[in-house]
Image: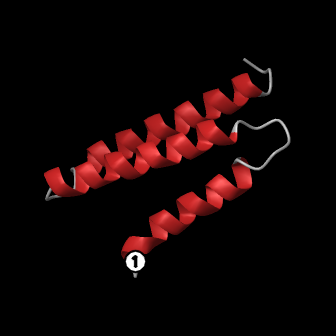
């Protein structure tokens, strides 16, 4: 059951963020599909999780990209 949680969360984000009036639903849909494909490859190729320090670095990079994207999208950057 836990394996389905990221999929459900991705669908929820697609539904929430991809349903605005001036939102490019196709871009959100293809981003979701790209994430599914990359996640599937990662699951097949990588058998052990990355070290904790790498996970923290990847998390910070991801959050930074999201914050910068939102700031640029709302005209603050």
The answer to whether 54 is drawn above or below residue 36 in the figure is above
* Number of marks: 1
Task: Determine whether, in the image, residue 53 is placed left or right of residue 35.
Answer: left
Q: At 78% from the left edge and 21% from the top edge, which residue is drawn? A: 76
Task: Determine whether, in the image, residue 43 is placed left or right of residue 15.
Answer: left
Near mark 1 (Cα within 10 A), the count class, few <14, some 14-19 or many ≥20, is few
Colour logic:
secondary structure
The answer to whether 12 is drawn above or below residue 29 in the figure is below
* Quadrant in which the C terminus appears: top right
Residue 62 location (% of width, % of height)? 48, 39
Residue 59 location (% of width, % of height)? 43, 44
Q: Residue furthest right?
A: 21
- Disc 1: which residue: 2
Q: At 28% from the left edge and 43% from the top edge, which residue is drawn? A: 54
Give the image quarter of residue 11: bottom right
Residue 10 location (% of width, % of height)? 54, 58
Q: At 64% from the left edge and 29% from the top edge, which residue is drawn? A: 69
Using the rendered image of the protein, determine whether residue 31 is visible from the camera's viewpoint.
Answer: yes
Q: Residue furthest front?
A: 26
Q: Nearer the viewer, residue 32 or 66?
A: 32
Task: Determine whether, in the image, residue 46 is placed left or right of residue 34.
Answer: left
The answer to whether 17 is drawn above or below residue 12 in the figure is above
- Secondary element under disc 1, as helix, strand or loop, is helix
Residue 1 location (% of width, % of height)? 40, 82
Q: At 43% from the left edge and 73% from the top edge, which residue is drawn? A: 4
Task: Determine whether, in the image, residue 16 is placed left or right of residue 29.
Answer: right
Using the rendered image of the protein, determine whether residue 46 is visible from the camera's viewpoint.
Answer: no
Q: Residue furthest top?
A: 77
């Amino acid at each position: 059951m836990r394996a389905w949680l990221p999929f459900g969360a991705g669908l929820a984000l697609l539904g929430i963020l991809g349903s605005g009036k001036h939102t490019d639903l196709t871009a959100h849909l293809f981003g979701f599909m790209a994430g599914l494909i990359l996640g599937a490859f990662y699951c097949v190729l990588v058998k052990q999780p990355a070290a904790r320090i790498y996970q923290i670095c990847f998390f910070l990079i991801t959050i930074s990209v999201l914050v910068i994207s939102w700031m640029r999208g709302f005209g603050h950057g």
